[in-house]
């Protein structure tokens, strides 16, 4: 049921995007640093969306890598602590009488 619902949502999104592209097919000037091009408005918006997504991923990459490094460090510490606990459990109990 979830796959059918996901497919229906996908079809609705694609239909809305195609109708948006057809309604906004008029070319608009897009100024690049090295020149100007006339692109359809829908294409210009999609390019801006993709560029924003790429920049967002690039900006968050440092934070993600730092978090992964920290998680690996904590896993190593936990493993060492478990090994130490296991070694302590193997020690014989001394009774001082």
Image (cartoon, rainbow, N blue to C red):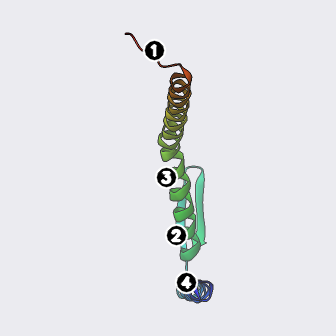
Asked where in the image residue 96 lies, by quadrant, the reply is top left
Q: State which mark lies toward you, 2 or 1.
A: 1
Residue furthest to the front: 97
Between 35 and 25, the one nearer to me in the picture = 25
Residue at 52 percent across and 64 percent down: it is 49
Q: Which residue is mark 4?
A: 13
Q: State which mark lies toward you, 4 or 1.
A: 1
Q: State which mark lies toward you, 2 or 3.
A: 3
Give percent across and percent down for residue 45. 52, 70
Between 66 and 60, the one nearer to me in the picture = 66
Q: State which mark lies toward you, 2 or 4.
A: 4
Q: Which residue is mark 3?
A: 56
Q: Secondary structure at mark 1?
A: loop
Query: What separation in Å lies between label 4 and label 1 (alpha carbons)?
Result: 72 Å
Q: Residues within 10 Å of mark 1 (few under 14, many from 20)?
A: few
96 horizontally vs 51: left or right: left
Query: What separation in Å lies between label 4 and label 3 (alpha carbons)?
Result: 23 Å
The numbered mark, 4 or 1, whose residue comes first in the sequence reads 4
Q: Which mark is residue 94?
A: 1
Question: Do tag 2 and tag 3 residues touch (Cβ < 8 Å)?
Answer: no
Give percent across and percent down for residue 14. 60, 84
The numbered mark, 4 or 3, whose residue comes first in the sequence reads 4
């Amino acid at each position: 049921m979830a796959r059918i619902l996901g497919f229906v949502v996908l079809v609705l999104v694609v239909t809305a995007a195609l109708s948006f592209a057809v309604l906004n097919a008029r070319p608009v000037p897009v100024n690049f640093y090295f020149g100007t091009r006339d692109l359809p408005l829908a294409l210009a918006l999609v390019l801006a969306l993709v560029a924003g997504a790429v920049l967002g991923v690039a900006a968050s990459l440092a934070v993600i890598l730092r978090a992964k490094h920290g998680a690996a460090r904590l896993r190593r510490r936990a493993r060492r602590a478990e090994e130490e606990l296991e070694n302590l459990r193997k020690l014989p109990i001394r009774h001082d009488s």
